[in-house]
């Protein structure tokens, strides 16, 4: 993924998490990921695997494709 996509994806995850009033710590727990890693994803500092995206989407009760709907 290019940097712009990584940034948009991170922002989308943050917006969806905040809409559901879930902390980064809670999202990390639900997605079986590290809280620091969630922060890095949301800030666009790291690329993320499809498996981890799937875990995040499931934790947010969203279809994985919705994470790529960058219209916020």
Image (cartoon, grey):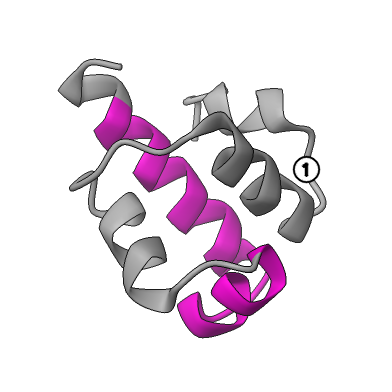
Q: Where, by quadrant of the figure, is residue 47 drawn?
A: top left
Residue at (40, 38) in percent of width and height? 48
In the picture shown, does residue 36 fall above or below 15? below
Q: Position of residue 39 (x, y in %)?
A: 32, 66
Q: Where, by quadrant of the figure, is residue 11 drawn?
A: top left
What is the tally of numbered marks visible in this picture? 1
- Label 1, on which residue? 62
Relative to 47, is 4 on the left or the right? Answer: left
Q: Is residue 20 magenta?
A: yes
- Look at the magenta stretch and give its main secondary structure: helix
- Residue bounds of the magenta highlight: 6-31
Residue closest to the far top:
2
In the picture shown, does residue 58 fall above or below 49? below
- The residue carrying pointer 1 sits among few (fewer than 14), some (14 to 19) or many (20 or more) residues within 10 Å by Cα, namely few
> Considering depth in this image, is 48 or 6 the residue closer to the camera?
48
Residue at (32, 73) in percent of width and height? 36
Residue at (30, 17) in percent of width and height? 1
Q: Position of residue 8 (x, y in %)?
A: 34, 32
């Amino acid at each position: 993924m290019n940097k712009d996509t990584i940034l948009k994806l991170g922002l989308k995850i943050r917006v969806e998490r905040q809409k559901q009033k879930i902390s980064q710590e809670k999202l990390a727990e639900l997605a079986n990921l590290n809280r620091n890693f969630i922060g890095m994803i949301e800030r666009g500092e790291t690329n993320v695997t499809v498996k981890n995206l799937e875990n995040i989407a499931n934790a947010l009760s969203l279809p994985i494709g919705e994470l790529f709907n960058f219209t916020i």
